[in-house]
Amino acid sequence: MKPDLRCVFRMGVVLLIALLLPALVAAEPLTLKRVVELALSHSTMAVSAAADSQRAFASYREARNQYLPQIVAGSGLGYSHGFPLTLEGSAPSLINVNSQSALFNPSLHDFVRAAKTDYEAAKLQSKDQRNQVIQDTVLSYAELHKWEDLSKHLQQEQVDAGKSEEIVNQRIQEGVDNPQMRNKARLATARVRLRAAEAQGAIDVLRKRLSELTGLPPAWIVTAAESIPPLPEIKQEEDLAAKAAQNSPAVQSADTRAAAQDLRARGEHRAIWPTVDFAAQYALLSNFNNYADFYRRFERNNASIGLAIRFPFLNWSQHARAEAADAEAVHAHKQAENAKNQVSEETLRLQRSVQQLAAAQEVADLEYQVAQSNLETLRVKLDSGGANLHDVDDARAQVNQLYNALQDANFELERARITLLRATDELAAWVGVQ
């Protein structure tokens, strides 16, 4: 019996450790860099971008491999009555091996270059989508950090509001305050609870979003303030719009796709040029297909090797296809120009908004400091009898309101600066990921 009890005890200890381990892990904050690395390896957008790049590379190899010999082996078995006719263009045979590859094909050469250029564009597009994943992760992480800090502050606000409501109730019972003051105190407490519920809801949603990006359970996601690097200063005199237009992977991808379309259009025009292919064939003929009855010298093993030269003289449908490709190339260039203009305009808007948001953040900070000083003054006057409790409560409510506004202003400024880093292709370096 004793050994059985020991085994049960050990199993219970192991089970307890397994249950407590997630809680222990959840207490460890995750750095911003680690969260971004997990998102890049797990998020659906990053995986889809990698798949698109792989598909583009496979298309390039498909076009390029037409210069390699394509070998097909098979058989053309069949019954012959009279003269042995062909089956699908080949004589009836026991074994048939065909090989063909392109040697000189100007059109194919341009199509291969176009496919390779498309692959380069897909890699740039994958980089842009990767930057989008980094931006989404960083903004979610920064916003979660904001709400976590605000939630701690709101807990103290709830305690203070509860104490104030209790004091007001006591003063009403003693006949010092008007009963209407009870509703005012309850309103202040209800506002704090509303803000706390909003903070908790935002925390839950952001942890869920980061969980979907990283694959971690939401309870494990706790931010670490020291892991967020300081944001670089934005100089308004710097031409960030031109910098973004030059460095943006989206603009580079659009330009590269336009170049690929030019190559594809030139390939369509060169489709009416002469082509030379290598061709070879081997066939093992049978003895039961009447070959010996119609040929004086019948040979079972037969082989041919040579060049297939083509001179396309008239192909009006190909001319029309080439004109359509020219139109698509013009359209691609206009799309690239539009993408460049959009990036430049959006970057300039962000650059100017950073200046405005910085001013708004400074105003919110000064208003909070003034309200905080006013609260401290009223507390001193309350101790000396120069102010009443309600004035202090009103001042504290204003301080709390301005503190919330300051946190919102800080985050809006942070969001604009992070988005501007993504526009100039500096976000990954700022986070510290490759």
Image (spheres, grey):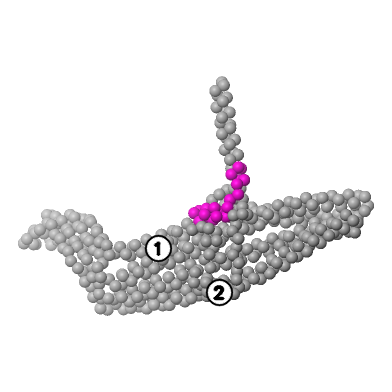
Using a 10 Å C-alpha cutoff, classify the residue at mark 2 as few (fewer than 14 neighbours), some (14 to 19) or many (20 or more): few
Q: Residue 5, how many percent across, how many down?
A: 57, 24
Dominant secondary-structure state across the stretch colored magenta = helix
Q: Assign the N terminus to one quadrant of the image.
A: top right
- Nearest to the observer: residue 270 or residue 210: 210
Using a 10 Å C-alpha cutoff, classify the residue at mark 1 as few (fewer than 14 neighbours), some (14 to 19) or many (20 or more): many
- The residue type indicated by label 2 comes to Asp
Mark 2 lies on a secondary structure that is loop
**Vertically, is 162 above or below 21?**
below
**Vertically, is 10 above or below 100?**
above
Q: Name the residue rendered at 81%, 58% in the picture.
A: 376
Is residue 380 found left or right of 58 in the rendered image? right
Is residue 282 found left or right of 2 in the rendered image? left
Q: Residue 27, how many percent across, how many down?
A: 62, 45
Instruction: Find residue 238 and name its label.
Output: none
Q: Residue 422, how many percent across, how many down?
A: 54, 65
* Boundaries of the magenta span: 23-44
Q: Is residue 166 magenta?
A: no
Instruction: Find residue 56 and name its label.
Output: 1
Q: How many marks?
A: 2
**Vertically, is 262 above or below 218?**
below
Q: Is residue 31 magenta?
A: yes
Q: Residue 4, how many percent across, how many down?
A: 55, 24
Residue 383, quarter of the rendered image: bottom right
Taking the view exactly as shown, the residue that stands out farthest to the left is 296
Residue, disc 2: 239
The tag earlier along the polypeptide, 2 or 1, is 1
Q: CA distance from mark 2 to mark 1?
A: 34 Å
Tag in front: 2 or 1:
2
**Vertically, is 28 above or below 375?**
above
Residue 58, quarter of the rendered image: bottom left
